């Protein structure tokens, strides 16, 4: 049913919005060596999580001889992770011209593959902030009805941009007209109100507004505030009337101040957080969603890696500022919800930013909380998402090591359960010894996950081409182990080095 999914999703309990298709009650039990209580940081030994119809019924200590559906062995269970800033639809690494050559159908199919990669990375929920051709709405609904595997999605449809702003085609001459929009050009409070209402009509769960210039757009300045306070207020009040919230893309101080004053619930990027901006965030209770990994990735790949010169240049100028701002926000107690802007960098490596949050001052537990309970609070789903407790959705991730000791173990989960279904177990071969899938194979779509009602879900077969850049060493336990390929290399523990921030820019920043 199309009618009002987004509205229902925003207002009603999650269980209603994501009610499984009618079928017999499905019950699974999952046990492991230990479980991390995400609130206290305590490790619970020998837990059993019982999930009935996709919702956690209880968590108890395993009794001697107690049978379970999946005994995952020597792993730590975490709640399913949440990425509050993704762009699932569309191919990776496209130049501005390459982007114009991608059909809507291809973009949507790429979205299906990207959703699968995201789920395999342990991210069972995403807030997808800006898409095209309503493919985000279609993907959200296909995932919710289990037609394709992927994370639960909250979508923003089209981002709102001023004329000449971050969402406009500023590099094209005026006689070249491009119909394609990931953003909708909306000027003035009335234009913003109309665009907001159109997005809501088409199924938006969130409204995304591009308040300042950005890194990935030609001819815009991240420090420049493009939208006026009145325009942002028009988006916020129009969204609020339908129970929706606004996510504001804002790098520079003035844009952050305006967005917070207007009542935006989250500030995306938040690269230049002044004391005044921190005070305003504290006053309004807005969250920041900081994505330093994106700029790290762009600087690492550079123009040789396909990025435009202006994208590299502007990344150099925001990267250090964004890290400094994140550090100061953490110190000031501003809620930081985890978000990666995946889609600029490849999907499926969403967990890599956790160690940057730790380097910026969070404890490993706080970094995990930013991707669970804090993110759930941003989404107004703190009673349904982000915890392993009765009444919460049956989403859990099994990782090899204690993430409080090695946060990077979260980058390559061994098992992912969503809505009470074990969707994926990492093949034993994909442990760093396995040959890297050729680039051409990386977009291959894996077989769809379990659909419907044929008994208890079974472990999914391995999908080597989708196992991306594994960082930890998995060895699937017998209960959930997929058939191991005969040429599987022996497992060898591997810990890749933490990402090093690129060297500080030598030249004077033009944005400072
Ligand atoms: Zn983005």
Image (cartoon, rainbow, N blue to C red):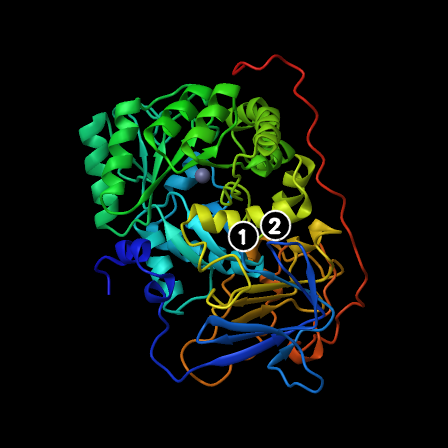
The residue closer to the viewer here, 130 or 269, is: 269
Residue contact at pointers 2 and 1, CB within 8 angstroms: yes
**What element does badge 1 sit on?**
loop
Tell me what residue is drawn at x 60 percent, y 28 percent.
328
**What element does badge 2 sit on?**
helix
The residue closer to the viewer here, 302 or 250, is: 250
Q: Decide if residue 89 is on the left or right side of residue 469.
A: left
Q: Decide if residue 25 is on the left or right side of residue 161.
A: right
Distance from label 2 to label 1 (Cα)?
6 Å
Residue 265 lies, in percent from the top left, at 39, 38
Q: Is 119 located above or below residue 214 in the figure?
A: below
Residue 245 lies, in percent from the top left, at 33, 42
Q: How many other residues sit within 10 Å of disc 2, few (<14), some (14-19) or many (≥20)?
A: many
Q: Is residue 178 in view?
A: no
Residue 309 lies, in percent from the top left, at 53, 25
Label 2 CB-ligand 1 distance < 8 A: no
The residue closer to the viewer here, 138 or 72, is: 72
Q: Which residue is identified by label 1?
A: 372
Q: How many other residues sit within 10 Å of disc 1, few (<14), some (14-19) or many (≥20)?
A: many
What quarter of the picture does the N terminus occupy?
bottom left
Label 1 CB-ligand 1 distance < 8 A: no
Ligand 1: quadrant of the figure: top left
Q: Decide if residue 509 is on the left or right side of residue 10.
A: right
Q: Which residue is identified by label 2?
A: 368
Q: Is residue 363 in view?
A: yes
Tell me what residue is drawn at x 53 percent, y 43 percent.
340
Q: Is 64 located above or below residue 331 in the figure?
A: below
Residue 444 lies, in percent from the top left, at 52, 61
Q: Is 510 located above or below residue 88 in the figure?
A: above
> Looking at the rendering, which quadrant does residue 96 occupy?
top left
């Amino acid at each position: 049913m199309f009618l009002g999914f987004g509205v229902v999703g925003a207002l009603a309990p999650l269980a209603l919005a994501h009610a499984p298709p009618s079928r017999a009650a499905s019950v699974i039990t999952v046990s492991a060596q230990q479980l991390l209580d995400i609130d206290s940081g305590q490790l619970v030994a020998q837990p059993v999580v019982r999930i009935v119809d996709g919702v956690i019924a209880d968590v108890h200590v395993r009794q001697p001889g107690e049978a379970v559906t999946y005994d995952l062995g020597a792993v730590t269970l975490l709640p399913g992770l949440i990425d509050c800033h993704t762009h699932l639809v569309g191919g990776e690494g496209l130049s501005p011209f390459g982007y114009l050559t991608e059909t809507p159908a291809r973009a949507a199919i790429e979205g299906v593959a990207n959703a699968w990669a995201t789920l395999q990375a342990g991210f069972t929920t995403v807030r997808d902030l800006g898409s095209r051709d309503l493919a985000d709405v279609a993907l959200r609904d296909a995932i919710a009805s289990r037609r394709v595997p992927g994370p639960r999605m909250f979508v923003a449809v089209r981002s709102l941009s001023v004329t000449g702003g971050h969402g406009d085609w500023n590099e094209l001459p005026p006689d070249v007209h491009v119909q394609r929009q990931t953003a909708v050009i909306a000027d003035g409070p009335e234009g913003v109100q109309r665009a907001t209402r159109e997005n809501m009509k088409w199924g938006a769960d969130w409204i995304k507004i591009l308040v300042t210039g950005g890194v990935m757009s030609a001819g815009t300045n991240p420090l420049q505030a493009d939208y006026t306070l009145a325009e942002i207020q028009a988006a916020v009040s129009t969204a609020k009337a339908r129970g929706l919230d606004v996510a504001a893309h804002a790098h520079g101080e003035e844009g952050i101040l305006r967005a917070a004053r207007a009542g935006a619930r989250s500030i995306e990027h938040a690269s230049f957080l002044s004391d005044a901006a921190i005070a305003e965030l504290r006053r309004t209770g807005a969250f920041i969603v900081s994505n330093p990994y994106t700029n790290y990735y762009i600087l690492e790949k550079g123009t040789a890696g396909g990025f435009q010169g202006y994208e590299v240049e502007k990344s150099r100028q925001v990267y250090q500022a964004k890290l400094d701002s994140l550090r100061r926000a953490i110190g000031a107690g501003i809620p930081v919800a985890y978000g990666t802007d995946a889609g600029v960098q490849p999907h499926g490596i969403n967990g890599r930013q956790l160690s940057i949050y730790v380097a910026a001052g969070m404890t490993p537990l706080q970094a995990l909380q930013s991707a669970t309970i804090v993110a759930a609070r941003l989404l107004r789903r703190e009673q349904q998402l982000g915890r392993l407790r009765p009444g919460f959705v049956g989403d859990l991730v099994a990782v090899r090591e204690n993430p409080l000791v090695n946060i990077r173990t979260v980058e390559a989960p061994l098992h992912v359960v969503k809505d009470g279904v074990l969707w994926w177990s990492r093949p034993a071969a994909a442990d760093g010894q396995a040959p890297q899938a050729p680039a051409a194979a990386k977009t291959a779509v894996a077989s769809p996950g379990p659909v419907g009602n044929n008994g208890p879900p079974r472990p999914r077969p391995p999908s080597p081409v989708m196992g991306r850049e594994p960082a930890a060493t998995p060895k699937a336990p017998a209960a959930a182990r997929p058939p191991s390929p005969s040429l599987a290399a022996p497992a060898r523990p591997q810990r890749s080095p933490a990402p090093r921030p690129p060297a500080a820019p030598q030249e004077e920043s033009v944005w400072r």
